[in-house]
Image: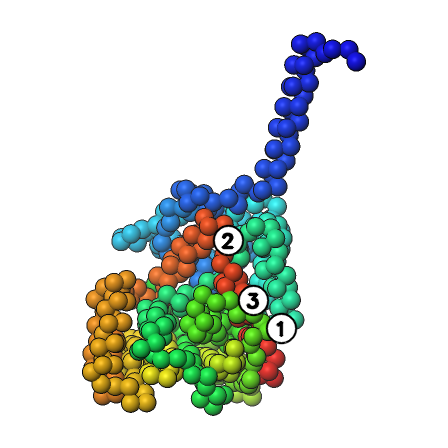
Amino acid sequence: MKNLSLKSYVFVFMLSLAFYSCSNSDSDNNASPENEFTGADDEVKLMTVDPGHFHAALVQKYGYEQVDSVVHVYAPEGKDLELHLDRIEQYNNREENPTNWVEEVYTGPDFFEKMLEERPGNVVVLSGNNAKKTQYIKQSVDAGLNVLADKPMVIKPEKFPMLKEALAQAQENDVLLYDIMTERFEITTLLQRKLSQYSDVFGTLEKGTPENPAITKESVHYFFKYVSGNPLIRPGWFFDVDQQGEAIVDVSTHLVDMILWETFPGEGIDTTQVEVVEAERWATEMTPGEFEKVTEMEPYPDYLEEDLNDENNLEVYSNGSFVFKVNGVHGKVSVEWGYESSEGGDTHYSIMRGSKANLVIRQGEEEDYVPTLYVEPVNDNSGDQYEAALQDAIDEIAEEYPGLSLNETSNGWQVAIPDEHRVGHEAHFAQVTEQYLQYLVDGEIPEWERKNMLTKYYLTTQAYKKSR
């Protein structure tokens, strides 16, 4: 073979370098650099799709350094979009801590397809009509987009396999699919969970029975309420359970999430470890005047005609409860909706039953409708030694939540919580968003989170079937 000249060597070297560069370029493209997050300013770019629920705006009630101020909104024209933009404008124009969001809006019947085509952002925010939400989630994940979705991510059992596929596809595509679980950040729930991990205070979690579960979560909500200081105007479809979802697959999502999160902290629960034992559903009745007040619509839209009774009142199946077992432990969730609260607003009740004490959250008239945590010893576990153990636990937890103290009651203690830790429901959306932003930087959602997300919706959809 003839020896190569210097010029030939240079040619071969340059050719190899070009090939290597192209190979690396292809590799980089496959790695989807738009989904690699470092925590840098403005690197997260939101795309809000069909924001029919006020939760979409609450994600933007505060600004985040990591999130670009320009948000691309894809939605059909109409009242839902107008209300969403009005809320964002309100946040931008408030005197205290105003935001600086810029909403770039596309309207048209092809809004979702247009979002997938243009892709001006890297995180899809979904909070609106739930009828197509599972499909939107799946298509977004398939397109390699991260998704932050309001609950519920699925409302019908026949759509559960699609959500299961979406969760698997998200992991395969290295994108993060996450739902907005605000109730974990409520301070009494946080403290209930923490105290349950002190064996000298709580003991061990009871197994319970269907009649007397080990852990119960109950919540009462109202259709007419105030959000960000203004009367909440709900879309008509909110009262159509085929579009919003029944209580058993909607608000119950929060309650199931908290039960899994509190009873088995940091442990992923598989669908094979749970079973729905019993479930029921019932309706809340609304008059035409009440419907008009909360929706600013009159008369009823056609899709609600089949839900009207002989008195022309609307019957909304917005109430439901079910009992399930997780690793042999019985849990119960219950959700009720009234039209309007005479006082106090939404309320929450919860009990965790331990061998040494019950940890109870009440939010009734006696508590001035403020969630309040009680420690109520059982099985003769009161006394100086027990009180000392409880005080030690509170002192240790107070290192993270300063100012906690104990007030003695007739059957135990009330945990006194400073107002600084009671940030409110609306602020919890920022806390969830910040958690999601950290997961983006981490590049993954913890395995226990992913497992519990799937199992949570498995339980709600199974309960939906059981209630019939």
Please tell me whether residue 461 is drawn above or below residue 28 in the rendered image: below
Residue 150 x %, y %: 49, 63
Which residue, given by chain and number where applicable, does mark 1 sit on?
157
The tag earlier along the polypeptide, 2 or 1, is 1
User: Residue pushed farthest right?
Assistant: 1
Which residue, given by chain and number where applicable, does mark 3 sit on?
454
Please, what secondary structure does the residue beneath circle 1 have? helix
For the C terminus, the image quarter is: bottom right
Q: Residue 309: which numbered mark, if any?
A: none
Residue 443 x %, y %: 49, 50
Please tell me whether residue 25 is drawn above or below residue 159 in the rendered image: above
The tag earlier along the polypeptide, 2 or 3, is 2
Q: CA distance from mark 3 to mark 1?
A: 13 Å
The local crowd at label 2, few if under 14, some if 14 to 19, many if 20 or more residues have their Cα within 10 Å, is some
Please, what secondary structure does the residue beneath circle 2 have? loop
Q: Amino acid at mark 2?
A: Glu
Q: CA distance from mark 2 to mark 3?
A: 16 Å
Q: Which residue is rendered at x = 33% and y = 83% of the image? A: 357
Is the C-beta separation of discs 2 and 3 under 8 Å? no
For the N terminus, the image quarter is: top right
